[in-house]
Amino acid sequence: MNLRPRAVNFDDVWSKLKETAEAIISLKPIERLTWDHNFSDIYFVCVSVPETQSRQLYAAVRDCLEIHTKELRRSLEDQTGDNLLSAYNREWSKYKQGAGYLHNLYCYLNKQLAKEKMDAESQHTFIADDSEGPFPHLGVGDLAFAIWKRELIIPLASKLVKHIIGLIQQIRKLEGTYSAINLADIRGAILSFVEVNELFLNESFLGQQKSPFTLAGGNSVTEFYEEMFEKHFLEATENFYKSLTSEAFVCLDCCPYMEAVIKTLDEERILAQRFLHHSTLPKIENLCYEVLVNEQLEKISLMCKDVVQGELLKDLKNMYILFKPLNNALPILLKEFENYIKKLGMEFNVSPTVDPAQFVGNITDLHTKFTQMVIEIFSGDGEFTISLDRAIQSIVNYREDPKQPPKISEKLNRYIDILMKTRKGRTEAEIEAQLSKSILIFRYIDDKDLFQKYYSKMLCTRLIASLSFSMDLEESMINKMKDACGYEFTSKLSRMFTDVNVSQGLTKRFLEEMVKNNKKLEVSISVMVLQAGAWPLTAPQNASEPSSSQNQSEQNGDYAPPIILQKSLRLFEEFYGTSHSGRKLTWLYANSTADVQMNYLDRKYQATMSVHQLSILLQYSNQDVFQLGNFVPLTALSLPTIIRAAKALVETGFLISNEKDLTELSVLTLNTSFYSKRINVKVALPQSSKPQEKEAEATCNTLMQDRKYYMECTIVRIMKARKVMKHNLLVEEVLKQTQSRFFPDVQFIKKNIEALIDKLYIQRTDQNDEYEYIS
C-alpha cells in the first residue's frame, strides 16, 4: 500500500467511518476487511494534503458519540428501580468495551492529538476547550468515557445512586431476595463512576506512564466517584448505624454488644468488598468504628476492668479488635492490662512466706502467662508488650522501704546460688532452663550493679569452696549476663573464672617444681591466686594498722596458720616470687579450707574444715579438754571467730561442749568416740556473725560508694571527649551511659558534678549552665 499523503474528500470518508463507529460503540459485528479499510482511511485523513483534517475527524467522532449517548439517556430516563439499574449496567458494559475497540481503531489519530498537545505545552501554549469544542486533548477512548460521564452519569446519578443505596440498605437488613444479576448490576454501576476516569494507557501518550490512581491534571481517579456516589453512601451508612445503635443494640449488655458490633463490621467489610471500590473500605471501617464504638466508648469502658481482671479471653479479644483502630480507646485497655499485672505481681512481693525460688517462679510464670496472652489475644501488639514490660519492671523493682534498694537482686541471687549448688534430681538442661528464666527477670532489674555485687560475692564463695556442681553452668550464666549487659558488666566475673583455671595450672607447676628440686612438702597444698581487683574479698590489715573492730582481729597480721602448714606456704611464696616479680601475695586464711585425716579414731575419717577450725582442733594433739577462752592466745583469733568455728565442730561431733550456747567459759572436750556413717565428713564453715539484714545493708553502703566513683568516671569521660557541654546535655548523656547499670536521679548527678568541680576536673564557663573540661 502506498502511504504517501494525498488529498482526501472528508465527507466521503466519514460516511464510511461513521457507520463503523456506530456499529463498534453498539458492539455490532463488523468485517475484518471493513476494519482494515477504516484504519487506512483514518491514517490518510490525518496526513491529508494540503492540510491535515485530524481535528475535523476528531470533532465528527465526538458528535457521533454524543448523539449515541443522548439516545441512550432518553431510553433510560423513562425507567426506574431495578429496570433502570439493569439497563444502565447493560448499556455501560457494551459502551465500555466498544470505546476500547474504537480507541484502538483511531490509534493514529490519538498519536497525532497527543503530539499536538505535547508540542503546545513545550511552547507554553494550550488548547482551550471552547476552541475545538469540549475535550480537545483526549484520545478517542477517553473522549468516549468523558461523554458518557457528561451525558449519562451526571443526569441519571440522583435516581441511580438513590436506588443503589436503597438496595444495599435492604441487603444489610436481609430484606428481599436478589439474583446474581442484581448483585452484579450493583457493582457494575458503582464501578462505572470510577472506570469513566481511568485513562487508556497506550501509545497515545507516547510512552508516558500514568498512575492508575491519578488523572493527567493530578486529580484522583476516584474523585468523581467520591463526589457522585461515595459521600451519599457514607452519609446513608452513618444514619443506618446510628439508628441501629439506638434501636437494636441499645438493649444489649457490653459483651454481647461487642460481639454484635464485630459481626456487623465483618458483614460490612464483605459488603464493601463485594460492591464498592476498594478505596471506600477503610472509610467504611472508620465510620463504623466511630458510630458503633467511639460513640459508645463510655459504656464499653465501664466493663474494661472486669473483662481484664476476670481474664475473659473471648471478650478481651473482642474489646481489643474494637479499640485498636481508635487512638483514644486503646490506652484505656492498655492501662487496665498493665494495672492488673501489677496487682498480681505485688501479691508476690508483699507475701511474707514466699521464698526466693517461689518468688522467681511466680514472676516467670506471670511473664509467660501474659506474654502468651499478648500473642494470642492481642496479636503480638507491641504496645501491649511494652505495657507488660512496664508492669513486670514495676513488680521486680518494688521497694518495701523507699529509702532502700529493691530486694530482687538479693532474692534472685540466692535463687541462682541454690541452683548452682544443688541438683536435687534435675538434669543440667532443666537447670539451664531455670537460669534462663532468672536472666529474664534480671533484664528487668534497674539496679544491675547491685545484682552484680551480690552475684560476685556468692560466686566467690562457690568457686573458693568448690560448691558449684557444674562449671559449665557457671560460665553459661555469665555469658547470658554478658549478652544482656555487655562485656564490661561481666569482666570481673570472667576474671574470677580465669583465676581459678590459672591457679590449677600454677599449683600443678609448683608441685612439679618441688619434686624436681627434691623439696618435700609436709602438707600438700592447692593454692588459688586471686586478683585483688576482681574478687569481692577484703585483704587482711597489717599488724601495725589498728583493726576497726574486734571481729576483724583474725583478718590482721596477728594470726598465723598452724605450724604444719607454714613450710608449704613459704615454699609456694618463694616459687611464685621467682616467676612473678613485683607481685605481692596476701594469704586469706579466713577463706581457706583444709582436708584433715582423723588418726585418733578407730576409723580414719577424712574431714574438710576451715583453717581456723584446724587451728582449734590441732590444740587437742596434747590434751583432750580446753576452756574455750584459752584458744584466743593459742590461735590469735578473736573470741567471736573462735565461738563460730568451735560451734561447727561441736555440731559435727568432733568436740563435746558442756553448754548448749558457747561462751568464753565453755569447756570443750575432744570426742574420742566420734562415729559417722560417712568416711568423708564436711564441717560447716563458720558463718558471718552479721545477720542477713545487716549484711545487705553493708552491701548497699558499699554500692553507693561504687556508684559515686562510677558516676564521677562517667562524667569525666564524657567531658574529656566533648570538652564543653551544657548542663542538660551532660545530664542526658550521663543517664544514657549509666542506665545499663543503674538509674541515677538528677540530684545524684548534680552532686557528683559539684564534687568534680571541687576536685578541679571540670569548671563552669561564663555561659549559663555550661561546663568545661580542665585538661
Image (tube, helix red, strand yellow):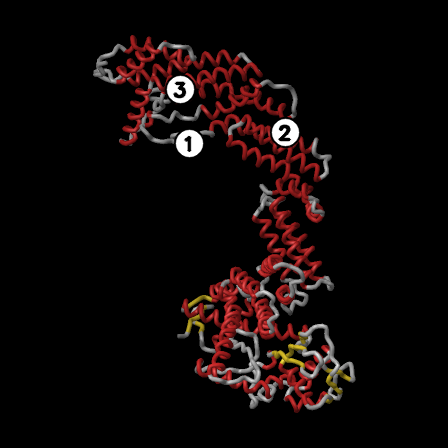
Q: For residue 214, which numbered disc appears in the image?
A: 1
Quarter occupied by the C terminus: bottom left
> Which amino acid lies under the numbered mark 1 shown in the image of this protein?
Thr
Q: Disc 3 residue type?
A: Gly
Q: Which residue is under mark 3?
A: 100
Q: Is residue 115 left or right of residue 261?
A: left
Tell which tag, 2 or 3, sits nearer the viewer: 3
Tell which of 6 and 407 is nearer to you.
407
Which residue is under mark 2?
240
Res 34 label = none
Give the mark toward the camera: 1 or 3: 3
Residue occupying image coordinates x 32% and y 22%:
110
The 10 Å Cα crowd at callout 2, few under 14, some 14 to 19, many 20 or more, is some
Q: Please, what secondary structure does the residue beneath circle 3 have?
A: helix
Above or below: residue 270 compared with residue 27: below
Q: CA distance from mark 2 to mark 3?
A: 39 Å
